[in-house]
């Protein structure tokens, strides 16, 4: 039903990436669709979310309307579906969780484990070109977080094996970081970006330590049994959620 972040688990933090298993949605959204307004009924989506939260023991997360922009939403209290545009959701409230929806885009979960400031970031190629993860870290710093105390988990997304972009998108991604071009693989005059690797560069530039960055190396496009993929299934694709919960008690120190 979901993949837990091993890095977060080590530090007693709850962070997960849902798969398409364990839900109630019928084809083509089988089974754990968590995306609204796709043609799947809201009853299925609600039940899927309830099952995911129950199975993972994570409170209902805050969700936004994602636009591939760089807006931030600070969340507290009980998790709801907000009607605001935001691709960065942050919380510093104990027991509160935040989430982003994806189907190929890269979900990034962040937490300052000393200050208990958590964030979920929606980083598709557009967000990555806009350095969205760096913007998220800056917002966390404004709330008191320190980069050296931040853990980052980069979830399943479309891999460079399957993700072809046009020349314009490739240029924007290359411009996002001095080393980004190294992670734009070229084949027959086509570019295939590695979104996780480019975001890792951006995280390192923000001062996040390499050993505090985890990458779940699974391609949503290749692994059709496990993941939804917009590129593969277009309007027949469901959505997954990446969720992080702000913990209640003070965890262990970083290693
Ligand atoms: Zn692939």
Image (cartoon, rainbow, N blue to C red):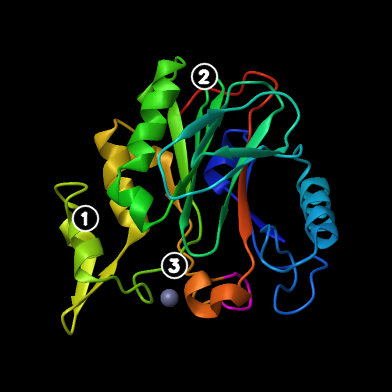
**Circle nearer the N terminus (2, 1):** 2
Q: x, y percentage for residue 115?
A: 52, 17
Q: Mark 3 against mark 2, which lies toward the viewer?
A: 3
Disc marking residue 192: none
Which image quadrant for residue 226? bottom right
Q: Is mark 3 within 8 Å of ligand 1?
A: yes
In the rendered view, does 41 fall on the left or right side of 245?
A: right
Residue indicated by mark 2? 114
Q: Mark 2 against mark 1, which lies toward the viewer?
A: 1
SS assignment for the magenta stretch, majority: loop
Residue indicated by mark 1? 172
Magenta range is 224-228
**Circle nearer the N terminus (1, 3):** 3
Residue indicated by mark 3? 158
Q: Work out how far the residue at label 1 is from the one at label 3, CA to CA, in angstroms.
A: 18 Å
Q: Is mark 2 within 8 Å of ligand 1?
A: no
Q: x, y percentage for residue 146?
A: 39, 20
């Amino acid at each position: 039903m979901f993949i837990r972040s091993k890095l977060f688990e080590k530090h007693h933090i709850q962070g997960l990436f849902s798969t398409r298993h364990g839900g109630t949605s019928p084809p083509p959204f089988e089974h754990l669709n968590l995306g609204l307004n796709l043609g799947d009924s809201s009853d299925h989506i609600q039940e899927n979310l309830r099952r995911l939260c129950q199975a993972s023991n994570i409170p209902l997360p805050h969700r936004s309307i994602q636009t591939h922009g760089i807006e931030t939403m600070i969340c507290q209290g009980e998790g709801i579906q907000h009607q605001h545009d935001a691709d960065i959701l942050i919380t510093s409230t104990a027991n509160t969780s935040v989430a982003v929806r994806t189907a190929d885009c890269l979900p990034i979960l962040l937490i300052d484990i000393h200050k208990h400031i958590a964030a979920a970031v929606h980083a598709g190629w557009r967000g990555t070109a806009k350095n969205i993860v760096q913007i998220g870290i800056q917002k966390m710093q404004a709330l008191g977080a320190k980069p050296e105390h931040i853990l980052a988990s980069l979830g399943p997304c479309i891999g460079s094996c399957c993700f072809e972009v046009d020349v314009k998108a490739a240029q924007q991604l290359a411009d996002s970081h001095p080393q980004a071009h190294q992670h734009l693989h070229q084949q027959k005059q086509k570019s295939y970006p590695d979104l996780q690797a480019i975001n890792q560069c951006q995280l390192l530039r923000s001062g996040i330590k390499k050993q505090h960055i985890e990458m779940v190396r699974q391609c949503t496009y290749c692994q059709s049994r496990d993941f939804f993929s917009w590129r593969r299934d277009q309007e027949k694709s469901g959505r997954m959620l990446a969720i992080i919960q702000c913990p209640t008690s003070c965890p262990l120190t970083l290693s």
